[in-house]
Image (tube, helix red, strand yellow):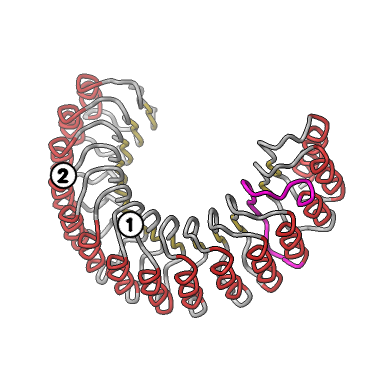
């Protein structure tokens, strides 16, 4: 290893425990390496032990990737023992490693003594409620951890209760990822209760859980009182229209949330209407995800009306809905009066050539939109030609996605040239 190398990526090379031992020996002498990626290298628990031994005398390595190595609880114990004394590592990535509650306990014990680690990724492991409790105990004594990723585990409502209790006193954690963690309405309530008082957490991911309208009500109540959360992901749950209405009511009193993901919640046009009404008055939300929500032309009209009065939203995701040419017309009208929207995602809808034409007509006059995604929209050469004509007069759009539409080579070439012109002149 050279004396100037700062980053080494050996991922997916199957170096095994023997290779890990050679690297560990070098780590004891190396003084320059800052980032080491050994993901998917079949290191196993024995290789993890070698690396832990190597880290004992290393004072420069700050980021270590060990994802998908089957190190298990035994392997993570060796590394956790080293973490107690290590003063250099700031980020550890352990996803897909068959780590269970015992391994989580070892790491939690290490967190109580470690003074440098800021990021810990334990996603896609086998950590349950007991492991969640252990990690909560570790957080209680950690003064440095800012990011904890527990997505794709089985934390459950009981485990999340322990984590939520810790949030009440924690003053360092800013990002908590609980995506796909078997959390329901009860777990959402536990988190919401602590969000009322927490003043440090800025990002909370609760996507792909079992949260319904009752849980949404608790989260909405938390939004009324919380003053720090900027990003909330509740996509791929079951909050439906009633839950969206409650969240919209909560947003009315919130002044910090800038990103909200409500994708795949079966909200329909009724649900989107509630949020669109809030958009008229909201002055903080910048990015809104409403993908895969059974939104049709009526819902598109509601959003368009909201956009005409909103002064902050810059990015709107509406992919995989049921928006047709009429809905596209409504959105074009909304764009005409929006002074802030820079990115619109309409992929996997059914706007067709007619919808492409009305959007193209708006592009002639629009001076804010930078990115438009129209993949998978049944647009043919006629619709593409309309878009090309619109781009002829547009100076701001630099990205237009038309993949999986049969637009023809001529229109594709013309559109590409206009986009290149805008990029070079922008």
Q: Residues within 10 Å of mark 2 (few under 14, many from 20)?
A: many
Query: Where on the picture, by quarter, is residue 300?
Result: bottom right
Identify the residue at image location x=74%, y=54%. Answer: 325
- Label 2 and label 1: CA atoms lie apart by 20 Å
Q: In this view, does 193 lie above or below 52?
A: below
Identify the residue at image location x=21%, y=48%. Answer: 127
SS category of the residue bearing label 2? helix
In primary-sequence order, the first of circles 2 and 1 is 2
- Which residue is labeled 2 in the image? 103
**41 to the left or right of 388:** left
**135 to the left or right of 147:** left
Where does the magenta region start and end? 337-355
Q: How many labels does the image show?
A: 2
Q: Which of 147 and 152 is in front in this view?
A: 152
- Which residue is labeled 1 in the image? 146
Identify the residue at image location x=36%, y=74%. Answer: 218
Q: Position of residue 200 (x, y in %)?
A: 36, 67
Q: Position of residue 230 (x, y in %)?
A: 46, 65
Query: Where on the picture, by quarter, is residue 76?
Result: top left
Query: Which quadrant is home to the N terminus?
Result: top left
Q: Where is residue 194 in the image (x, y as percent from the top left)?
A: 30, 72
Query: Where on the picture, by quarter, is residue 361?
Result: bottom right
- Single out the mark in the foreground, 2 or 1: 2
Asked if the magenta segment contains residue 56, the reply would be no
Q: Position of residue 313 (x, y in %)?
A: 62, 65
């Amino acid at each position: 290893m050279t004396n100037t190398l700062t980053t080494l990526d050996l991922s997916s090379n199957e170096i095994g425990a023997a290779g890990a031992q050679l690297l560990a020996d070098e780590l004891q002498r190396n003084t320059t390496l800052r980032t080491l990626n050994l993901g998917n290298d079949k290191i196993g628990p024995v290789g993890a032990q070698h690396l832990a031994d190597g880290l004992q005398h290393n004072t420069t390595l700050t980021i270590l990737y060990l994802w998908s190595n089957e190190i298990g609880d035994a392997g993570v114990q060796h590394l956790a023992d080293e973490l107690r004394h290590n003063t250099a590592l700031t980020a550890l990535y352990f996803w897909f490693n068959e780590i269970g509650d015992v391994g989580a306990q070892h790491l939690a014990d290490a967190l109580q003594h470690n003074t440098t680690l800021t990021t810990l990724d334990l996603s896609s492991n086998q950590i349950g409620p007991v492991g969640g409790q252990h990690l909560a105990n570790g957080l209680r004594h950690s003064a440095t951890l800012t990011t904890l990723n527990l997505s794709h585990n089985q934390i459950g409502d009981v485990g999340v209760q322990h984590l939520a209790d810790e949030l009440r006193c924690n003053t360092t954690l800013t990002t908590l990822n609980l995506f796909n963690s078997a959390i329901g309405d009860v777990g959402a309530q536990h988190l919401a209760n602590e969000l009322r008082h927490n003043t440090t957490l800025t990002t909370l991911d609760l996507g792909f859980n079992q949260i319904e309208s009752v849980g949404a009500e608790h989260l909405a109540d938390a939004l009324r009182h919380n003053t720090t959360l900027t990003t909330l992901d509740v996509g791929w749950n079951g909050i439906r229209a009633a839950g969206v209405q409650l969240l919209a009511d909560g947003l009315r009193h919130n002044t910090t949330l800038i990103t909200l993901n409500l994708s795949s919640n079966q909200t329909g046009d009724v649900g989107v209407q509630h949020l669109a009404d809030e958009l008229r008055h909201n002055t903080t939300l910048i990015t809104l995800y409403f993908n895969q929500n059974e939104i049709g032309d009526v819902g598109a009209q509601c959003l368009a009306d909201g956009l005409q009065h909103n002064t902050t939203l810059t990015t709107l995701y509406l992919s995989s809905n049921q928006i047709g040419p009429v809905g596209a017309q409504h959105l074009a009208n909304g764009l005409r009066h929006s002074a802030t929207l820079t990115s619109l995602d309409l992929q996997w809808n059914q706007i067709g050539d007619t919808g492409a034409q009305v959007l193209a007509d708006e592009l002639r006059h629009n001076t804010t939109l930078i990115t438009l995604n129209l993949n998978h929209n049944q647009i043919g050469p006629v619709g593409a030609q309309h878009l090309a004509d619109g781009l002829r007069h547009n100076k701001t759009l630099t990205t237009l996605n038309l993949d999986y539409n049969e637009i023809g080579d001529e229109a594709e070439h013309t559109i590409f040239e206009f986009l290149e012109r805008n990029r070079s002149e922008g």
